[in-house]
Amino acid sequence: MQPRNMSMRGAVDLAAVKAAGEAAQKAEQARAVRARQVQQAEATGTAVPSAGPLIFDVSERDFEGQVVQLSAEVPVVLNFWAEGYARPRSSSR
C-alpha cells in the first residue's frame, strides 16, 4: 500500500526502458548481420541464405529448447493440434 501523500504519476519502470533499449540494439545487430549475408551472397552470386523457418513442428521433448528459448528473443505464436484431428487450415504444412 502506498502512502496517501505519494503519487505514482509520472513513474518510469527503468528495467523496462533498459530492456527495450537492449532489444532494439539486438534487433539492429541482427538486421546488420542479415544485410551482410545478403550483400555477400549477391557479391559472390550465391543464393541468399534463408532467415530460417517461420513455422516448424516441435514435440514435448524439444519444446523448451526450441520454443521457450526463442520466445526470450522474439514473440512466438503457438498453434496446438493433436494426432487424430485434422491440422488447422492456417498451418502451412
Image (cartoon, rainbow, N blue to C red):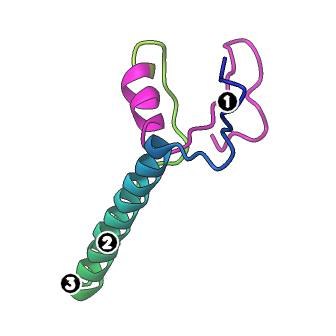
- To which residue does mark 3 refer? 44
Mark 1 neighbour density, 10 Å: few (under 14) some (14–19) many (20 or more): few
Q: Residues within 10 Å of mark 3 (few under 14, many from 20)?
A: few
Q: Is residue 54 above or below residue 83?
A: below
- For the C terminus, the quadrant is top right
Q: Residue at x 34, y 62 (%)?
A: 30
Which residue: 30% across, 84% down? 42
Q: Secondary structure at mark 3?
A: helix
If you read the primary sequence from the N terminus, does the residue marked by circle 1 or circle 2 appear first? Answer: 2
Residue 35 at x, y percent in the picture: 33, 76
- Mark 3 or 2: the one toward you: 2
Q: Badges 3 and 2: C-beta atoms under 8 Å apart?
A: no
The quadrant where residue 46 appears: bottom left
Q: Say which label, 3 or 2, has the lower sequence index.
A: 2
> Which residue position holds label 2?
32
Q: Amino acid at mark 3?
A: Thr
Q: Is residue 69 magenta?
A: yes
Residue denoted by label 1: 79
Extent of the magenta region: 64-93
Residue 3 shown left or right of residue 14 in the figure:
right
Q: Quadrant for residue 33, please give it.
A: bottom left
Of badges 1 and 2, the one in the foreground is 2
| Picture residue at 65% right of the left edge, 23% below the top | 2
Q: CA distance from mark 1 to mark 3?
A: 39 Å
**Which secondary structure, mark 2?**
helix
**Residue toward you, 20 or 26:** 20
Residue 47 located within the stretch drawn in magenta: no
- Secondary structure type for disc 1: loop
Label 1 close to label 2 by CB (< 8 Å): no
Q: Counting residues from the N terminus, which is met first, the one under dot 1 or under dot 3?
A: 3
